[in-house]
Image: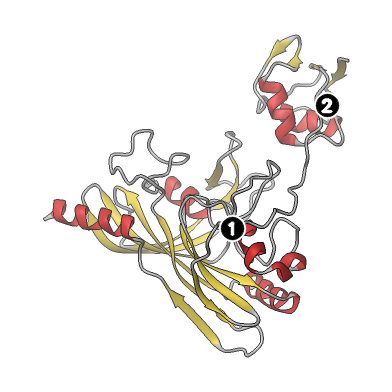
Amino acid sequence: MKTQHEVTAESAGQRLDVFVTEVLSGISRSAVQKAIKNGLVTVNDRPVRPHAALKEGDLVAIDQIEATPTHAKRPEPRPDIKLDIIYEDDDLLVLNKPSGLLVHPTILNELETLAAALLAHLPEIAEVGDGPERPGIMQRLDKEASGLMVIAKTKKSYTNLKKQFQKHSVIKRYLILVHGRPPQDEGTIDLAIGRATNERRMAARHEPLSGDRAAITHYRVQQYLRDSTLISAQTETGRTHQIRAHFRALGCPVAGDKLYGHKQDRLSVGRLFLHAETLGFKHPTTGKNLEFNLPLPPELEKIVQILRLDEK
């Protein structure tokens, strides 16, 4: 059944997908975007893109859209996904997440995730955390990134570690390879981050839009290489795709980044060159300062060695 809605002055300037999501309660925005792309939504009898801005008086026609889940479910334990545990005690564990493994399921309820592996290793953490899909997980690493993560094993540990993350007292340092050279040997990128027109991407903006959130990344050049730079980056905040969006805004996208980088990656990395090398925090029970360091995985170290030889 098709319904029609006239855009009022209050809704003028709003994105089409946002407008339709508000009109149709109970339908996720991703489902609305898919419906728009499939021609189930028109504006003035014409198909348009999800991010199109509406004008007062526009007529939005909406065909029937199937509801989709808006929350991920608790994943099924996967003992076949092995964990690379660096440290473990009664309160927490620190592990090395490999590139290619999703941290937790989305509304698509993916089966192969770090969360599923954690539930197989530690069934008792099922009730730890802010959501059933993220048992004990304190931070997120992009699927194609690798490196150190901390997992809380108890509710008390989770609460303590969460406060440390919120106060930005956790040390989070990453090794990245970027295209080209940054403007300085070291510096700070202080650009707010929010959704880009492309819904899959985030954007770092000099002039923040409504809904953008502050984001700060400090960086230091480790070595200049052929057509690229090896950089140590430390984040104060933990925004989605923060490092990737910040270095794209700097004109130096992260190597191997298919979403934010060059369409043809000249460096042929084969994966996202983003590795969480250092993680430091206070132990939630003892208060002792803990710091863990993890060298580049072999496939990334090999790339650096090749670029070093080319530079000589």
* Residue 292 appears left or right of 238: left
* Residue 62, x across and y down, in percent: 81, 19
Callout 1, which amino acid? Leu
Residue drawn 75% across the image and 58% down it: 132
Q: Which mark is residue 114?
A: 1
Query: Element type at marker 2?
Result: loop
Q: For the view shown, which residue lies furthest in the front direction?
A: 80
Query: Element type at marker 1?
Result: helix
* Residue 119, x across and y down, in percent: 67, 63
* Residue 224 appears left or right of 108: left
**Residue on which the image places disc 2:** 9
Q: Nearer the viewer, residue 142 or 80?
A: 80
Q: Is residue 14 above or below residue 273?
A: above
Q: Quadrant of residue 150?
A: bottom right
Residue drawn 14% across the image and 55% down it: 309
- Marks 1/2: CA–CA distance: 46 Å
Residue drawn 62% across the image and 56% down it: 78
Q: Nearer the viewer, residue 266 or 233?
A: 266
Callout 2, which amino acid? Ala
Q: Is residue 14 visible?
A: no
* Residue 42, x across and y down, in percent: 74, 15
Q: Quadrant of residue 186?
A: bottom left
